[in-house]
Image (cartoon, rainbow, N blue to C red):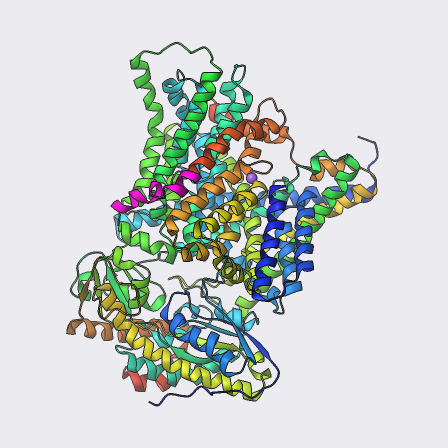
């Protein structure tokens, strides 16, 4: 509903702007396209087909160019782009770590340290997701890996199922924000900003979001107290730290290789796979069968994203052929309102789109349009990259549509309605939005660490 | 030479909507100082609104740059521009106009570009595309994050290159060519993934390379020559008076681009080394770099490498016929003959 | 299950099974191709930093591996019903209406697949005309990676067509449950089984 209201609002804005410039807008055609869009989505047509067919319709109606003669090139370009190679590599790393049992050990070790806090085991969900995010660049991979590890621990406990699912979804939605992250790589690719700088700018926001999530859980824990498990002797606690070692080693390897000057952010993802395989070997779990299963899962998840990317790029190409991005950018830049109001409108647009759109295709279709406006308004491109990434993450946990929530729903050992996930994730969603608000008010949260690098 | 003149007006007639995609980035002076004033502004004005132009850059249309020939050929735009070495995967002859070490100074590069145009068009017209003009970007030079005084100091260093002839060149002088996608080069230099990078003096300044490198050579390795192309079917369909109008416009654009190539080459250096007074076209570096002036041995090394390695390797890639075209058209200007 | 599946539907089912099997093989190859890609890039990083050389073609080759990996796994992903649909509404509708929407979705997807596959082959032809090579040190003829890529797109098209054929036949013959099973969203059970299999693999006793 939010999205529909937003699209209609945008249309109104376009009419308003067109009236101001004296151009006439094809209102009937635009309304028709929006209707097709909404009906197809509602009817359960595949996201890629909706985008692709919309692209073809727009091309046929509005363009006098033989755009179809360039379609092959439009599909081939992004498919063979080296920078996007990081996507399957991060997914592959997650699959290997999961099957090698390393994620399980990470979870157990953190639990020993955190389970006596108010909120108990729920804190472990956030902390383990945060640490896993520091090696993996994918939210889906983080939620899938830590979700399948964590959920069995909550079987037959008194924890609120909604809170358990909500905390895992929220934790998963840090996968892209905490460096490394695919969204940053894609954003850097589109906007020609430094991925290294984006990672550094994401540092404090990552900590901020993690703390806010921990705050949500603590509040919940204080209001719904559970019996604390017995305290463990310090020696046991210290010994448990061994379980963290592989994860720590991988963090050092992935981020260290980037900042030590040994690898580019894309290459670091490949080193992560090699590192994961190495630890699997140490655990004596590196078997053909295990690699084979990881390979299939990686291929499937990459293809799922890949088909949407193909369609999104086609739509993107046809929109640029008929000059929509430039016209829209001109229009927004000339609106008679201050820059912060436009920025709020842009953020509102992302939030609205994010309720029903998948984050990855959202970033590919919108950033090329929005980025020039943001720069023209005088905002820092790196800061905006962090904000967009947070909005993409929020999209992944905003009902009714969100990949991270679907993944978790699919993993529940006992099933149950998906509304459990929707309700559980709400407090975390609000905390995430609060973090975006803080970044708007204090951009230094992102930019201050960069001042040491320049 | 005297400037070719863009006509002051065009007689009324059937209106024409023209679509053009030219430079890689909307911020480049080649775009802001030549393409916008001529294509976007002067053409509609002087044609009295008869011709309107939709002009954009590769970045705005999400293009990589190596597909421009195909873009123009398939009628997505009427006019397209792209750097020749990037297009050489589709049309290898184009690489030969701008080989590493071929033209030590810009005057020679211009002579070669003008001389080769008929032969290049013969090649391109097979694909339904025709070059209107070949123009330069600022000289391609070496930026490094560590001090160096001559090319021989690059021995053993990792140098980010693009294109085959620069690869050949860098390998021959004992350095290690590294292939890194353009968006990642800034951070690769920042972190030392690569020690040096080659790009135009102006592009380096614009892409904020002075933030991540300390020394820049002013020795021109090549010129990143680029070309304006038209779709032949569209071109032939044009009303002759419109065609003449556009052709004359591109003659003037061509002169302006060469003039700009000359000033921008020096401007990129002065901006990078922090000479605020002389820095007019590019962003001024916050932390001034050191200019490495070419020594005599460097120029000799460039010429020798060109003759012994770069040229024969290009003919190997392009075919024997390219060697013949080179000897007929380019060798008399460059003074270096290709010997099979 | 009602006894006696009509002959045309049986043929279509056999066809789907056969194409799915081929698609699965292609997807496993696509997955191993990513493992190979990780090895290649790791090798390039190590070689550059420790051994002082670089393949100077890794960027291009791994790009091709990505393109081919995506294309070759599209069909299998479709057979596994893993391509994303927004099916919150669809799943609440009565079976009678739901099956029509399933068939509509697969028909539109097949239509888009026709366009993708056609576009893919068209760029292969264009590269052949140009005799195009990439700008890497190896000067790889573009026909090679693009041809492999386009074959994957073709497989995706075939998969969507046989699914469309089988589901449309089933719909016309009134076998609504079968349409839902073939195209309906993956049940909670499917996904759980998959996740638990992965965890189980991790928890297995170490191989002897
Ligand atoms: Na991450
Ligand atoms: Na969402």
Q: Quadrant of the C terminus of chain B?
A: bottom left
Residue at (27%, 46%) from the top-left corner? A451
- For this view, does A38 lie left or right of residue B104? right
Q: Nearer the viewer, residue C130 or C191?
A: C191
Which of the 4 image quadrants contains residue C195? Answer: top right
The answer to whether any part of residue A71 appears in the image is no
Residue at (45%, 83%) from the top-left corner? B249
Above or below for A215 versus B219: above
x%, y% of residue B301?
Answer: 20, 72
The answer to whether any part of residue A240 appears in the image is yes
Q: Majority secondary structure of the magenta segment?
A: helix
x%, y% of residue B9?
Answer: 50, 87
Above or below for B275 versus A149: below
Residue span colored magenta: A437-454
Q: Quadrant of the N terminus of chain B?
A: bottom left
Q: Nearer the viewer, residue B208 or A376?
A: A376
Quadrant field for ligand 2? top right
Q: Nearer the viewer, residue A354 or A272?
A: A354
Residue at (41%, 47%) from the top-left corner? A385
Above or below for B161 versus C25: below
Which of the 4 image quadrants contains residue A284? Answer: top left
Q: Is residue A448 magenta?
A: yes
Q: Is residue B161 magenta?
A: no
Q: Nearer the viewer, residue A258 or A188?
A: A188
x%, y% of residue B213?
Answer: 24, 57
- For this view, does C8 lie left or right of residue A351? right
Q: How many numbered badges does the structure rendering display? A: 0
x%, y% of residue C181?
Answer: 71, 35
């Amino acid at each position: 509903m939010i999205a529909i209201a937003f699209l209609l609002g945008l249309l109104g804005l376009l009419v308003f702007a067109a009236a101001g410039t004296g151009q006439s807008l094809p209102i009937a055609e635009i309304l028709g396209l929006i209707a097709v869009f909404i009906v197809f989505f509602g009817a359960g047509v595949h996201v890629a087909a909706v985008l692709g067919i919309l692209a073809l319709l727009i091309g046929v109606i509005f363009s006098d160019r033989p755009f179809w003669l360039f379609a092959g090139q439009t599909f081939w370009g992004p498919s063979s782009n080296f920078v996007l190679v990081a996507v399957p590599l991060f997914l592959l790393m997650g699959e290997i770590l999961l099957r090698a049992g390393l994620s399980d050990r990470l979870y157990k070790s953190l639990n020993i340290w955190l389970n006596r806090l108010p909120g108990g085991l729920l804190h472990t969900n956030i902390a383990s997701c945060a640490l896993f995010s520091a090696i993996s660049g994918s939210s889906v991979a983080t939620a899938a890996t830590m979700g399948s590890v964590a959920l069995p621990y909550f079987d037959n406990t008194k924890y609120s199922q909604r809170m358990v699912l909500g905390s895992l979804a929220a934790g998963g939605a840090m996968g892209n924000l905490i460096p490394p992250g695919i969204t940053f790589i894609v954003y850097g690719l589109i906007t020609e900003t430094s991925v290294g700088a984006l990672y550094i700018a994401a540092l404090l926001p990552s900590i901020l979001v993690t703390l806010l999530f921990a705050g949500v859980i603590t509040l919940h824990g204080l209001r719904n107290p559970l019996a604390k498990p017995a305290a463990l002797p310090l020696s046991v606690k210290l010994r448990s730290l061994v379980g963290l070692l592989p994860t720590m080693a991988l963090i050092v390897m992935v981020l260290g290789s980037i900042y030590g000057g040994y690898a580019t952010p894309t290459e670091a993802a490949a080193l992560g796979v090699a590192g994961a395989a190495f630890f699997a070997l140490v655990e004596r779990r590196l078997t053909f069968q295990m690699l084979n299963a990881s390979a299939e899962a990686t291929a499937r998840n990459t293809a799922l994203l890949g088909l949407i990317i193909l369609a999104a790029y086609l739509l993107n190409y046809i929109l640029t052929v008929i000059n929509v991005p430039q016209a829209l950018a001109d229009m927004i830049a000339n609106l008679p309102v201050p820059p912060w109001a436009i920025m709020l409108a842009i953020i509102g647009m992302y939030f609205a789109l994010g309720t029903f759109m998948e984050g990855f295709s959202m970033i590919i279709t919108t950033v090329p349009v929005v980025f020039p406006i943001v720069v023209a308004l005088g905002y820092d491109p790196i800061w905006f990259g962090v904000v967009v990434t947070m909005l993409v993450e929020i999209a992944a946990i905003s009902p009714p549509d969100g990949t991270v929530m679907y993944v978790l729903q699919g993993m529940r050992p006992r099933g149950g309605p998906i509304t459990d996930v929707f309700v559980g994730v709400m407090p975390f969603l609000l905390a995430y939005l609060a973090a975006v608000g803080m970044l708007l008010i204090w951009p230094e949260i992102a930019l201050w660490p960069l001042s040491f690098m320049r | 030479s005297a400037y070719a003149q863009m006509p002051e007006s065009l007689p009324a007639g059937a209106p024409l909507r023209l679509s053009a995609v030219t430079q890689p980035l909307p911020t480049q002076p080649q775009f802001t100082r030549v393409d916008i004033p001529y294509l976007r502004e002067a053409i509609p004005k002087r044609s009295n609104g008869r011709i309107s132009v939709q002009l954009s850059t590769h970045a705005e249309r999400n293009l990589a740059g190596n597909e421009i020939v195909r873009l123009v050929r398939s009628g997505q735009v009427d006019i397209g521009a792209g750097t020749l070495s990037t297009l050489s995967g589709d049309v290898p002859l184009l690489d030969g106009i701008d080989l590493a070490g071929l033209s030590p100074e810009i005057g020679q590069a211009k002579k070669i570009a003008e001389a080769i145009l008929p032969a290049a068009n013969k090649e391109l017209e097979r694909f339904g595309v025709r070059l209107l003009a070949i123009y330069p970007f600022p000289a391609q030079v070496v930026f490094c994050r560590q001090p160096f005084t001559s090319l021989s100091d690059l021995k053993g260093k990792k140098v980010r290159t693009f294109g085959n002839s620069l690869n050949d060149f860098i390998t021959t002088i004992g350095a290690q060519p590294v292939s890194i996608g353009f968006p990642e080069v800034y951070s690769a230099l920042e972190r030392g993934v690569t020690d040096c990078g080659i790009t135009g003096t102006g592009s380096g300044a614009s892409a904020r390379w002075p933030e991540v490198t300390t020394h820049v050579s002013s020795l021109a390795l090549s010129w990143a020559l680029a070309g304006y192309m038209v779709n032949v079917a569209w071109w032939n369909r044009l009303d002759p008076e419109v065609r003449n109008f556009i052709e004359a416009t591109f003659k003037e654009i061509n002169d302006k681009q060469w003039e700009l190539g000359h000033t921008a080459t020096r401007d990129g250096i002065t901006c990078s080394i922090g000479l605020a007074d002389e820095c007019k076209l590019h962003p001024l570096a916050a932390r001034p770099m050191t200019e490495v002036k070419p020594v005599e041995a460097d120029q000799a090394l460039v010429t020798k490498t060109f003759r012994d390695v770069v040229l024969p390797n290009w003919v190997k890639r392009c075919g024997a016929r390219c060697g013949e075209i080179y000897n007929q058209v380019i060798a008399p200007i460059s003074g270096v003959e290709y010997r099979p | 299950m009602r006894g006696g599946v009509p002959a045309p539907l049986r043929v279509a089912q056999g066809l789907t099974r056969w194409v799915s099997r081929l698609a699965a093989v292609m997807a496993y190859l696509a997955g191993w191709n990513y493992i190979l890609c990780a090895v290649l890039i790791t090798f390039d990083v190590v070689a550059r930093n420790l051994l002082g050389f670089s393949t100077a073609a890794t960027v291009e080759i791994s790009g091709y591996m990505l393109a081919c990996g995506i294309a070759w796994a599209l069909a299998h992903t479709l057979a596994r019903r893993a391509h994303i649909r927004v099916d919150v509404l669809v799943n609440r509708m009565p079976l009678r209406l739901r099956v029509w929407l399933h068939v509509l979705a697969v028909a539109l997807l097949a239509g888009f697949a026709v366009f993708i596959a056609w576009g893919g082959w068209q760029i292969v032809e264009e590269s052949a005309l140009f005799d195009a090579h990439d700008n890497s040190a190896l000067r790889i003829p573009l026909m090679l990676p693009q041809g492999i890529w386009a074959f994957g797109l073709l497989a995706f098209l075939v998969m969507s067509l046989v699914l469309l054929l089988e589901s449309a036949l089933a719909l016309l013959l009134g076998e609504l449950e079968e349409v839902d099973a073939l195209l309906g969203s993956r049940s909670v059970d499917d996904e759980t089984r998959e996740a638990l299999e992965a965890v189980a693999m991790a928890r297995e006793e170490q191989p002897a």
